[in-house]
Amino acid sequence: MATAFAYWSLPQIFFLGLYTLLGEVLNARKSFGPFTWAPVVNNIVAIVLLVAFIVAFGTASRGGHGTEWSFGMIALLAGGATLGIAVQALVLFIFWRRIGLRFRFDFGWRGVNLGTAGKAAGWTFAMLIATQLAGLIEINVSNSAGPQFAGPFVMQNAWLIFMLPHGIIAVSIVTAFYTRMAEHAHQGAVNSFRQDFSSAARSIMLFIVFASAALIVTAYPIARVFTGDYQAMGLVLIAYLIGLVPFSLVFMAQRAFYSLGDTRTPFFFTLAQVVVIVVGVLICFTVPPSVRAASVAFVVSLASLLQAVLAFWLLRRRTGGVDGTRIFASLWRFVVAGVAAMIAGAGFLVILGGVSAGAFPVSHPIAAIVSTAVVGVVMLVVYLGFLAILRSNDLEAGLAPVLDRAAARSSARR
């Protein structure tokens, strides 16, 4: 079955590469929307074909799907997944035409810089191997706790929640700034490059610090949405979230080096992170099984913090500065506002009943969603209020697009 699924699924590699290439060209032309929203088309195709599979063959419980999978079942499920990825990539050709680009096949291999691309890809591939090694050790150590305690499955779900704000906020901001940094790096405009990096880093911190604070406070109710054993998953989630801010800043630093045409340096500061993770995670064998998965997650967060410090130091050496004074001035304001929001959010969560067994915020998934939303709103108000009190210039800059759009809609209605 694995081989059969592979034949249908491996073409996704080509279409994912095509999607990335077409999307980055659109980003270079300041057209960011299509690259961001094309995966929605993939999701629609996937949902339609999954429904078709259920109609044709039934669910796992009703259809009795064991090891007897027919050609049609495999083709519909695996082929449908590949079709979604293909549509996600090919739809971007429509937007190429809208910005005046035309595609034609060209099989000439000379002058396309495959040697340079191969060298850059080599360091990236080495970085991938190193991180996979660390991930393998994480899985084995967390799995050693036994089936009655949190393990890889819980950690994977917590990691997906952890990645949500990073993917929505950090990746979106970096995507917009990456093109500008690459242009300034190509022009040798070092001061403009620094300003781009500083603006992107501060924009990421403005939103990610709040996201981290809010998710830490509401970790148990959020975990309750997914599982009745919310204590174990919530603790793992909190351990991961401690490293959310440095994780996103490392992502920003990596793209800064990539815009400079340097994939070698990111390999080395990632290798340093891998060493810390491997050593720290192996030490987690000594902690009780009940908190082993959370300990592994905490080691990952600690490694992300050390990696961020190293990455910023190396970038500062490379560019002569990263506007560190201004970034730190913004960071301490975000942290103070975040701590204040956490105190307010935790207090409101206690008012709602707390997170002990049977309390309203963790009594049912719907109650958990309601509690998370209410506490989140309270924390957002406190966070923005403290930033205003601390006279954060980044607050005005960060909210400007939202306020401008709201003003434009108000004017249009009038």
Image: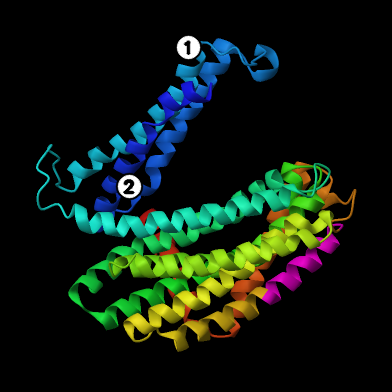
Residue 232 in view, yes or no:
yes
From the image, tell me which residue sits under label 2.
Answer: 20
Magenta part, dominant SS: helix
Q: Mark 2 near mark 1, Cβ–Cβ under 8 Å? A: no
Type of amino acid under label 2: Thr
Residue at 64 percent across and 47 percent down: it is 156
- Mark 1 packing: few (<14 Cα in 10 Å), some, or many (20+)? few
Assign a secondary structure to mark 1.
Answer: helix
Magenta segment: 339-353
Q: Label for residue 72?
A: 1
- Residue drawn at x 17%, y 55% is 113
Residue 25 lies, in percent from the top left, at 24, 52
**Residue sitting at 38 percent across and 34 percent down?**
12
Q: Is residue 286 left or right of residue 188?
A: right
Which percent across, then down, holds residue 1?
A: 53, 21
Q: For residue 349: magenta?
A: yes
Which secondary structure lies at badge 2? Answer: helix
Image quadrant in which you'd find residue 275: bottom right
Q: Is residue 340 magenta?
A: yes
Q: Is residue 289 above or below residue 316?
A: above
Q: Amino acid at mark 1?
A: Gly
- Tell me which label, 2 or 1, sits earlier in the chain: 2
Residue 85 appears left or right of 94: right
User: In terms of depth relative to the viewer, which is nearer, 230 or 131?
Assistant: 131
- Measured along the vertical axis of the image, is residue 327 above or below residue 185? below
Which quadrant does the C terminus fall into? bottom left
At which x and y percent is residue 260? 29, 70
Q: Is residue 380 visible?
A: no
Q: From the viewer's perspective, is 97 left or right of 230?
A: left
